[in-house]
Image (cartoon, grey):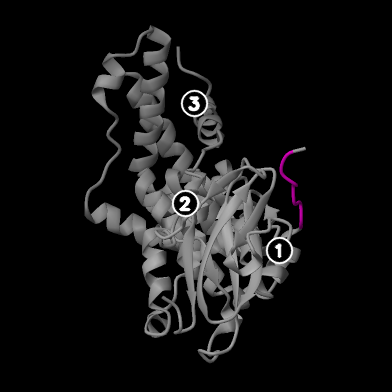
Amino acid sequence: MFEQEDDIVERMIQQLRRPVAVDPALDARVLQAITAPRPSQRSVWPWLAAAALLGALTIWRPWSRGSAADRPDTLQFVLVAPQANSVSLVGDFNDWDPKRSPMRTANGIWAAVVQLAPGRYRYAFLVNGVEWRADPGAPAARDDEFGTPSSVVTVGGKGS
Amino acid sequence: MGIEKVESSDAELVRRVRAGDIGAYGVLVSRYRDRLGRYAIHMIGDREDAEEALQDSFVRAYRSLARCDDPARFGAWLYGILVNRCRTTGARAARRRRMFVRDPDALHGAAHADQSERLEWTDAVDRALARLAPQHREAFLLKHVEDLEYEEIAELTGAGVSALKMRVKRAREQLQRYLREAEHV
């Protein structure tokens, strides 16, 4: 016995309307792509290009374009951590004090903006006040004497 | 408890992104990811290509955000970018003659008859959709699956309302035939 005319199509529509879960990592890939430096900027900030290829989540602010090498730069640090209740940015630039650079969240994407003078800094994310995480895309700090994961950011041309 | 939920409007988020808040764009991506992903997957038929098209659409939208005239309708504007991107991918995929091929072992290895029947039905739906002409599939999905009005679809696709109605009608007729054929195989 055939279904009523169009019933079979209605059944198909119901099937197609079911929610589809896209890989949540797509969010990070999009953020990574939009913050990757364009070709003309790569000669200025080569570490950012490398970091983008590696999956860096550290974001260079558009307004920092053209700043001189000896002036402070404004950087936005981003971590995708949907399960976290709190995330702080800690590093050489804030004496590793979690209270000084708390990160703000929007749908699990945590962000903090800091101004850094030219130089080389080690940093990490402190998740829920207890878990240390390095930046998944930035270069790892190999000279960190404290035994917890950390990353390195170099601002301007005076680092390393 | 838990993560602070941000329920800002699209217009507010677009305003923040334009002011340099990239995190706000992350909220928009996560807001539209699954819904637009569903359209891309059904339209293109290959999950990997669909996710690539989706990612590319989000990146293009970000880079062209200054051209979004009405930030309150960011979603509709984004849909337009994705519809165009899917057309390009669809044409490329057709050239490569990619078709839906479900793992035959999955069908034979289904533990229960009803599970096997469900897989066969899903397979029949995918195949029927893939057999439609791209313009018909596009109109059918936007109208019946994404639930858009004809006027909205006209805006997204550049086609006239009467042409779209005809495409949807043809798509329904063809789908009915393809699904009936599948039932009798």
Disc 2: which residue: B138
Which of discs 3 and 2 lies nearer the camera? The answer is 2
- Horizontal side, residue B98 vs residue B138: left or right: left
Name the N-terminal-most of marks 2 and 1: 1
User: A93 and A153: which one is in front?
Assistant: A93
Residue denoted by label 3: A8
Q: Secondary structure at mark 2?
A: helix
Q: Residues within 10 Å of mark 3 (few under 14, many from 20)?
A: some
Q: Name the residue type under label 3.
A: Ile
**Residue at image location 27% in from the left, 41% down from the top:** B99
Query: Furthest residue to the top?
Result: B112
Residue B4's label in the rendered image is none
Distance between the alpha carbons at the discs numbered 3 and 2: 19 Å
Subunit of label 1: B
Please name which of the two marks, 3 or 1, marks the residue nearer to the observer.
Answer: 1
Residue B102 in the image: state x and y as whole percent: 29, 30
Seen in the picture, residue B111 relative to B129 is either above or below; the reply is above
State the residue in front, B174 or A31.
A31
Label 1: few (<14), some or many (≥20) within 10 Å?
A: many
Task: Give the prevailing secondary structure in the magenta stretch.
Answer: loop
Residue B75 location in percent, x, y?
A: 64, 59
The residue wearing badge 1 is B13
**Residue pictured at 75% horizontal, 51% vertical:** B6
Q: What residue range appears in magenta?
A: B2-8
